[in-house]
Structures are given as structure tokens and as C-alpha cells.
Amino acid sequence: MRRLNGSSITPQQRTAWTHGLEEAFVDVHPGMRITGLYLPGQGCRFYVDGKFSREIADPVFAKAFFAIWLDPGARDTQLRQRLLGLAGND
């Protein structure tokens, strides 16, 4: 999030976002699934193994969080293309 958003993230936002993520995520074990639901203009919700975990009502956070995988500057361009349905069906 920091790499893609640079200095636009304030220290206060970083602290609040860290707290929200710590509440949303549990220790992940093999076979567990964490799902994030992007709510444009509202924020996002997280689910652990299909059960609601936490909502973060911060649209700036949500955009920055999902940019990790979906932004054109994402590190894993192949994963980004697959998530966006842009990868070829070879």
C-alpha cells in the first residue's frame, strides 16, 4: 500500500489501517480463506472462511488495499491480469 500510494498515506491513516487489518485478519492456517469485498465509495468487508470478520468504512483504505493486486503498478502483473479476467485461456 505504501509503495503504490507513496507519501499520500499519512501516519494517522497508517496507524488506523494497521489496527483495522489486525482486527479483520486472523492467523491464517493452510486451507483457510480470507475474502475481501470492495464497496466502491464506502470501504470494504472481510470474511474468514465465509464468515463476516470486519468492515472498514474508509474508501481511501479500500482503494489502497485492493490496489495491491489490481493497480497497474501491482508487482504481480500476471496475477493482476487473471484477477481482472484479462489473461488468455491458454
Image (cartoon, grey):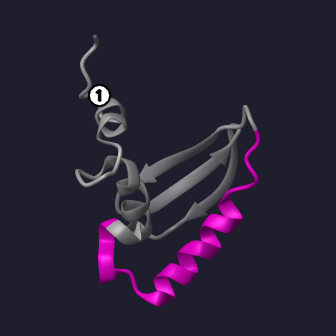
Where is 36 relative to 56, above or below?
above
Q: Please tell me which residue lies in front, 53 or 83.
A: 83
Q: Please tell me which residue lies in front, 16 or 78.
A: 78
Query: What SS does tag 1 mark?
Result: loop
The residues colored magenta run 4-29
Tell whether 88 sits left or right of 17: left
Q: Where is residue 19 in the image (x, y as percent from the top left)?
A: 64, 75
Q: Please tell me in which quadrant of the rendered image residue 79 appears.
A: top left
Name the residue at the front extreme. Answer: 75
In the rendered picture of this protein, how many numbered marks are placed on residues?
1
Q: Where is residue 88 in the image (x, y as percent from the top left)?
A: 24, 18
Mark 1 nearby-residue class (10 Å; few <14, some 14–19, many ≥20): few
Residue visible at 66% across and 60% down in the picture:
24
Residue visible at 66% across and 38% down in the picture:
33
Residue visible at 28% across and 13% down in the picture:
89
Q: Position of residue 81 (x, y in %)?
A: 28, 34
Q: Please tell me in which quadrant of the rendered image residue 56 appears.
A: bottom right
Q: Which amino acid does label 1 sit on?
A: Gly
Where is 89 relative to 47, above or below?
above
Tell whether 71 sits left or right of 44: left
Placement of the N terminus among the 4 image quadrants? bottom left
Q: Circle 1 is placed at which residue position?
A: 85
